[in-house]
Image (cartoon, rainbow, N blue to C red):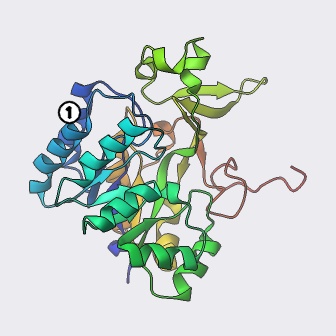
Amino acid sequence: MTQANLKLALGPLLFFWPREKVMTFYRAAIEWPLDTLYLGEVVCGRRQQLRSRDWVALAQELAGSGKEIVLSCQALIEGESDLKRLKVLVDNGELAIEANDLGAAKLARDHGLPFIAGPHLNIYNGETLAVLARLGARRWVAPLEMSRDMLAGILAAAPAPECEVFAWGRLPLALSARCFTARHFNLKKDSCEFRCMEHPDGLTLKTREGSDFLTINGIETMSGATQSLLPHLADMRASGVGRARISPQAEHCEEIVRTFAAVAAGQTGSDLSACAKGGLVDGYWRGQAGIVKLGETQNASA
């Protein structure tokens, strides 16, 4: 297969935006050169500008475009209310879901619904991938820390569902029961005042020296920099990757998508460094620390 066969996916929105901005964003994104759009709340169940039924309705509206529409499930299920929201997504009856929790994978199997194994399932070997494939996974998203060599080894070992790789965006590294954004503003999680909405690309955490280090996004910790695998698209395809994921951000998203589409088609793409928050990194893909900048080499003494 050639590099041009690499498909593009717009991952789920990880930040908290006002309802109207979300609706406007996706109704524009459906016209971009994408093969797949993921819709849904992955991070925090308190973010209910759009409730589960609203996400399902939007997904059904966009499904008429001919693109693949997937409903993404919350990654950290903490209580009955989270489970009810998950069941609404699974009960949609036709659209595939992205399972970011094993409970979501079980519900999808029980409903006979196809699912994508999301990055939060942490699939690090072929044996785990085979189990999820038997449960009904038709695609899987590789863990963010997985290197090209490790991934290539898994894909070469045995036939497996299609693989998707997180190719652009601030890396969603970890989730916690504690809300870091609320804590930053001296608020309790249950009375957070929805401060996340004031930071449409997350709140940057700096080192004492003033360098961008991490990003806090409610209960989620993200990278301070933006991962870009744009220079590695041909390498991804050669490794057996079928789809590259672009994570939504508040600005420049259309330019990013069109640049990825051009490069995936073998054309020359524009420089996206001005579109990145916190600079560009690609360390994980190259088997180094994730914070290593695009094209640089990790300091051996670090």
Task: Give 298 or 78, whichever is nearer the viewer.
Answer: 78
Quadrant into which the N terminus falls: bottom left
Examine the rendered structure and indicate whether residue 118 appears above or below residue 86.
below
Left or right of 281 on screen, residue 17: left
How many callouts does the rendering have?
1
Task: Give 34 or 139, whichever is nearer the viewer.
Answer: 139
Callout 1 crowding tier (Cα within 10 Å): few <14, some 14–19, many ≥20: few
Q: Residue furthest bottom?
A: 158
**Residue 116 x %, y %:** 37, 64
Which amino acid type is shown beneath numbered disc 1?
Thr
Q: Residue furthest front?
A: 80
Question: Residue, x 36% and y 46% (percent of image)?
Answer: 12
Left or right of 14 on screen, residue 205: right
Which picture quadrant has residue 81? top left
Task: Give 79 or 142, whichever is nearer the viewer.
Answer: 79
**Residue 54 x %, y %:** 19, 37
Examine the rendered structure and indicate whether residue 280 appears above or below residue 240.
above
**Residue 179 x %, y %:** 55, 27
Question: Residue, x 29% and y 49% (percent of image)?
Answer: 87
Question: From where the camera sits, is residue 254 visible?
Answer: no
**Residue 253 x %, y %:** 35, 41
Task: Give 104 or 151, whichever is nearer the viewer.
Answer: 104
Question: From where the camera sits, is residue 185 visible?
Answer: yes
Residue that carries the numbered disc 1 in the rendered image = 24
Which picture quadrant has residue 164? bottom left
Examine the rendered structure and indicate whether residue 193 appears above or below residue 199.
above
Question: Residue, x 66% and y 64% (percent of image)?
Answer: 286
Left or right of 111 on screen, residue 148: right
Query: Tag 1, which secondary structure?
Result: helix
Question: Residue, x 64% and y 74% (percent of image)?
Answer: 149
Q: Residue furthest top?
A: 186
